[in-house]
Amino acid sequence: MSDQRFTRQLSGALLARFEPIEADLLRLATRQLADMLDAGAADVQLAASDGVFGRLLPDAYRDDDEAAAEFRRFTSVNLLERKAQNAQIVLGSLGADAGEADAGAPDSADRQPVTITLDADAVQAWLRSLTDLRLTLADRLQIAPDGVVHLDGDDTPFLRELYEWLGMLQEDLVHTIDV
């Protein structure tokens, strides 16, 4: 299989192909993102206390804390809801995983690659959700502006590999729509 996950079709739509385990990982990460975004939109105090929301919703006015807080108060819920909608579009395009579709589904070794078609709106939702996933992981990994990972735990290697893989997917998607 080609390293490139996305290819442009004559119709202008993009075709994406993932191994079953990759599609499962995308579903899991995106489902968790959607849940987090929904929780943040429902609980403004949670959004204000969790640093990940600071990365997802950066200050509009960096030199004016009061104006930044006021802007956030009026826009954060709508922005989080739109981000959650983008995540739902990604989940919808990936479809149900084998375990959801059929409890007696075959082992992942017997499953076929997942092929999906993305129209222009879905492509934009994918781009935005991949960015949101990477921002969330960057916060969880405590990645500093210089790129250094400061999280030191058992999950760090997996989370870092996921972060890098999502970056490669995002780069491939951008490259595909840019040609």
Image: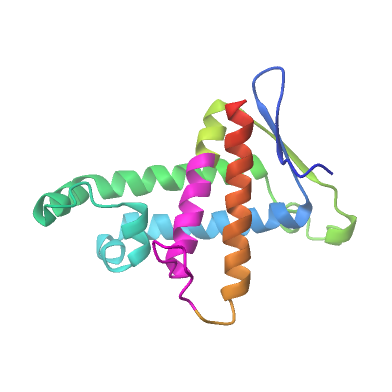
Residue drawn at 73 percent across, 40 percent down: 4
Residue positioned most to the right: 110
Residue 22 at x, y percent in the picture: 71, 54
Residue 29 position by quadrant: bottom right
Q: Tell me, yes or no, whether the highlighted magenta stretch contains residue 140.
A: yes
The answer to if 5 sits in the magenta stretch is no
Q: Residue at x 68, y 17 (%)?
A: 11
In the image: residue 23, left or right of residue 173: right
Query: In the rendered picture of this protein, how many numbered marks are placed on residues?
Result: 0
Residue situated furthest front in the rendering: 146
Please report the residue visible at 83 percent of the width from the left and 57 percent of the height from the top: 105
Give residue 146's position: percent from left, percent from top: 42, 63
- Residue 50 in percent (x, y) is at 33, 67
- Find residue 77 and report its horizontal and vertical position in percent: 29, 49
Question: Of all residues shown, which one is farthest toward the top?
Answer: 11
Residue 31 falls in which quadrant of the image? Answer: bottom right
Viewer-proximal residue among 29 and 172: 172
Residue 60 vertical placement versus 43 (above, below): above
Q: Which residues are magenta?
A: 127-151
Q: Is residue 101 left or right of residue 71?
A: right
